[in-house]
Image (tube, rainbow, N blue to C red):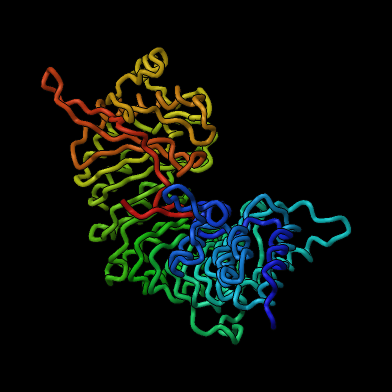
Amino acid sequence: MEGMDVDDVLANFSFLNIHVTNENTQLVPREALVADVHSKTVGHERPFPFLSLPWLAKWRVYSYLSSRDCLGLSRTCRHMYKFNTFAYTHLQFLPPNTLYSLTHSICQLTKVLACSPHYAEAMRTMRIVGYSPSDVPDGCDHEVFYKTLDEGVMALLEHGRHIYSLTLDLNLTGAINFFPKTFTKLLQLPTIRHLRLATFMPPSYFPESILPPEIQEPPAHERLCLSVCSGSWVPMVVRNPRKLRWFALSMFDKNLEAGNEVWARTLHQVAEAATELETLVLNGRNYLFADVLGQILQSGFDRGVLGKLRSLSVNTSTLSLLSLRQLFSGFSQSAVTHLRIVVNHNGRWLHDFGPQYIFELSELVPNLEEISLDQVGMAKASPLPGHLGTWGEAFRMFKKLRRIAFASMFVLDLLCSQTAIDDEDDDEAYEEAETSGSENPGMDVDDGDDEGDEIKDEKDGDDSLVPNLVQLGVWADMFLDEHLRMLAPFAEIWFLDSRFGGQTATGYDQRVMEGEDGRMEFMIYCRHKRKRNGWWWGEHDPVPLD
C-alpha cells in the first residue's frame, strides 16, 4: 500500500492531540535548525548549509526533536522527507487524556501505520500513561471504547515489530484493567526487552498447554515491572528469565491463595534461570510469605543462579522479627549489598519492628552497604520505635555500610508543621532550629558561591518548606553525632519522600572532625544540594546502583 504524504501524516498527528516525542525530550526549534542558522564570515552572513551536512550529523539533529518537529522539518524539502520516520521512533501518550481521546488517538495512529509500513518499522519504544475514565460521549458505550482501546494497543504492537520498550501504565484509572488481547500479544513478542504494566488483571489459559498457536519463543526481558493480579499469564511471561536484570512484581489479589500460588511459581522460575538478575523488587502486602520467599531465594543462591543479585526491596505487611530470620536466613553468602524494607504501612509499623530488626540483619546479611527503611501510605508523621541510641548501636554492627535512608515521615511531615519527634532530648534541637532560621544550626556549611545552598522543594519551587528542611537537617546532624557515630566507609544519610522528585526529600554527606576537646564530632556536610534522580527500586525509571 502506498504511504501517506507527509502533510497528511502531520495533519493526523495534529488531530490526535497527543504527546508523541522522541526519547530525548530536549526540543530544538525548527527555525533554529534551518531558517535562522547562519555562518558568520567577514562582512556578511550566509545561510548554514544544513543539507550539506553528513547523514550522521542530520540524524543526530533529528534525535533531539519532538515528533511534531521531526515531521515539520521533513516538510521543508524532498531531501529531508526521508527523515520523517524519526517521528515514530519513540511514541508517548501522556496525560491529560480520557478514555475517549486515548482510544481515538491510538486508532488514528494505527491507521497511519497501516498505510505507511516504513513508519511502523521505525517504532522502537512506546509509552501509554493513564486516562480519566470519564468523558465518554453521551450515547456511547463505555465498554465498547474499553475493548477498542485493548484492540488498538494490540494493533500497534502488531505493526511495531521492532519495539523493544513498552510502558502501559493505567494507574490513573483507579481500577484494575483487563486487556486480554494486548496481554496475549505480549507473549508473542520476543523483541521487547523492557516491559512495564500497571495495574491489570492478566488473562488465564486453561489448561495452560492450550495457548494461542502464535506463541512460540517466549520473550527474553531485561527489565520487567508487573503490577498485576494473579493469572496464569504472569509466570508465562517470565518463562525465559535468562537475560533478566531488573524485576519488579506487585500482586494485588483479593484471593490470598491464588495470589500466593502465582507469586511463588513466578519467583521459582526466576530463581532457576535468572543468572543476570541484579535487582529484585517485591510488593505483595499480604502475599509475600517470608518462609516461602526465603526458601526460593536460598535455592537460587545455593545453585549459583542468583550470584549477581545485589539489591532487594521488600514491601509486605506480614513481615515480623521471626519471618525476617526466615526470609534472610540464606543471604550470608549472597552478593546483596542494597536492601530496602517498607516498615510502615498506612501508619502501622511491622510487627515487633524496632532496632532489633537491624541487629538481626547485621548477622544475616553482614555485607550490606545501603539500608533503606521506607513507608507507604502514612498520613501522619511517627518516630522510629525505640531509642535512637539503640538504633545507632545496631547500624554500627555493619562494617561496610555506606548509606542509610529513612522515610522523612519518621522525622516530620515536610508538608506540614508537625514533627514526629517526641523524645525530650531532641526538643532542644528543634527549638534551636526554629529560632535560628536559615543559619542551619548544627550543620557544617562551607562558604562559597556554590556551596551551602539550602535545598528547596522541587514540588512547589518556593521557600515554604525551608524551615521543615532545616529541622530535618538538625535531626540528621543530631542522629549522626549523638547516636550513630559511625566512621568510614559510612558517608551518607538520606530521607525518602515519594511526593518529591526522585522520591527524595533531601540527603547529606557526613563529615568527621576532631573537636577541641579531642572528641570526634560527626556532622552533616552541606557542600551542595543533595538530590537524586531516583532509586534503584523505582518502577518508572530505576537508576543504577551506586
Q: Residue furthest right?
A: 139
Q: Residue furthest bottom?
A: 213
Decide if residue 199 is in sight here: no
In this view of the protein, which residue sits in the foreground, 119 or 44? Answer: 44
> Quick check: 207 above or below 287?
below
Residue 162 percent coordinates (x, y): 52, 75
> Quick check: 264 above or below 544?
below
Total marks shown come to 0
Q: Say which residue appears at 43% left-offset and 62% top-offset.
A: 247
In this view of the protein, which residue sits in the foreground, 25 or 507? Answer: 25
Assign the N terminus to one quadrant of the image. Answer: bottom right
In this view of the protein, which residue sits in the foreground, 210 or 451? Answer: 451
Q: Residue furthest front?
A: 43
Residue 92 percent coordinates (x, y): 59, 59
Q: Quadrant of residue 343?
A: top left
- Answer left or right for 513 relative to 115: left
